[in-house]
Image (cartoon, rainbow, N blue to C red):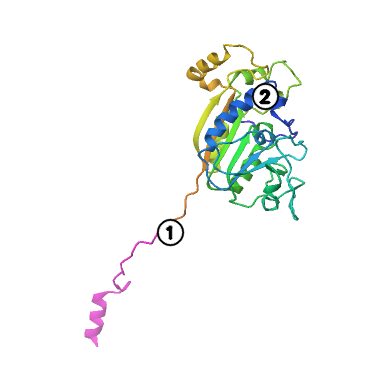
Amino acid sequence: MRSAFRTKPPRYPTSWDDFPAGEHIRHAVNTVCDDYAERIFGYHFAKLGSLSAEISLESSPIRHHINYVPYDVPFSDEVNTCEVKTGFSNCDSAGVMSLGVDNIEPKTCKGNTVVGQSNCLPFSENSIDGFLLANELDFAQDPHEILREVDRVITQNGYVIISGFNPLSLAGFAKFLPVKRGNILHDARFFTSYRIKDWLQLLGFEIIEQRQVLFSTLFFQQKWKGAVKFQDYLASYFPWCSAVYVILAKKRVIPMTAIKPKRNLKPRFSAVGASVRTSTANRTGR
C-alpha cells in the first residue's frame, strides 16, 4: 500500500465553490453531518478546514463551535474573525501563530474562528468533544498526523465525523481522465472508506455508522431532471460506488482495572535435603 504522506502538499480548496458541483456536495454532506451531530453532546465542537467551516450543524446540541481554518484561506462572510484577548499559543511544527480557545471572546462574533494548520492543534488534551473533517484528509499532506492530533485532543468517548471522496466511484475514475484538468478535484487524495476506518481503529476509535451519498462524477453540475431517481436506485443496489462517504466514529477508552492477586496458602515447613533416618541414627549413637 502506498504511503499516505506526500512530499508536495496538494492544492487546498478555500470553499465548496471551488468544485463544479460544490453546492450540491455541500448540501449532501451537510444533511448527513447534521444528523450525526444530534448524537454528540458536550461543550466544544471543532470543525477542521475551510470546507468544514461551511457546514452548518444546526441540530447539534453543542453550542460552542470552533472553525479551525488555514492561515492562507480568506474568511467568508459567514465566518467572522473574533476579537482576541491577550495571549497566544505557539505551534512550532506548523510554523504559525494560533489562537487558543480561552483567548476567544464569543460575544464579539457570530462564529469562533481559530487560524492554524490541522496537523498542529493548539488545544489541550481531552478538551474537544466532537470533530468534523469534511474532506479534510483528501487535501492533506499527511493525514496520519491530523488524525493523531485529533486523537490527542478529543475527549474520552468523543465523536469524529469524516467525509471523503470515494475512489471506487464515477468521480474516482473521472479523476484520471483528461477532463477539466484545472479542477481541484484532480488534486484530491480519494482515500477509500476502508482505509480511513482502518486508521481510526488503530487509534482506538469505534466505527458507529457510515453513509454513502451522491452518485455522479462531481466534475459537472447536475442538471438532469431524472438524476434524483437514478441516484436513489444506485443508493439501493450499488451503495459501494457512491462519490462521497460520511463516517461517524467514537473514541473508546477502556479503563484500567486493578487485578487483585490470588490468595496463596502458606506452604508447610519442610527441611530440604534432610534425612529422617540419618538424624535418628545420630541420636542413637550419642
* Residue type for callout 1: Ala
Label 1 sits on residue: 258
C-alpha span from label 1 to label 2 = 53 Å
The magenta stretch spans residue 278? yes
Label 2 sits on residue: 22
Q: Is residue 67 left or right of residue 194?
A: right
Is residue 195 among the parts visible in the rendering? yes
> What's the residue at 51%, 17% (across, down)?
232
Q: Is residue 96 left or right of residue 194?
A: right
Residue 109 place in picture, x, y as percent: 70, 44
* Farthest-out residue, front: 107
- Quadrant in the picture for residue 63: top right
Q: Nearer the viewer, residue 262 or 213?
A: 213
* Residue type for callout 2: Gly
Residue 256 place in picture, x, y as percent: 46, 55
Quick check: 277 above or below 59?
below
* Farthest-out residue, left: 284
Tell me the quadrant of the picture where the N terminus can be found: top right
Crowdedness near tag 1: few (<14), some (14–19) or many (≥20) residues, C-alpha within 10 Å: few
Of labels 1 and 2, the one closer to you: 2
Q: Nearer the viewer, residue 204 or 180?
A: 180
* Magenta segment, prevailing SS (helix, strand or loop): loop
> What's the residue at 38%, 62% (across, down)?
261
- Quadrant in the picture for residue 133: top right
Total numbered circles = 2
Q: Which residues are magenta?
A: 258-286
Q: Secondary structure at mark 2?
A: helix
Residue 121 place in picture, x, y as percent: 67, 46
The magenta stretch spans residue 140? no
Quick check: 112 above or below 264?
above
Q: Are marks 1 and 2 in contact (CB under 8 Å)?
A: no
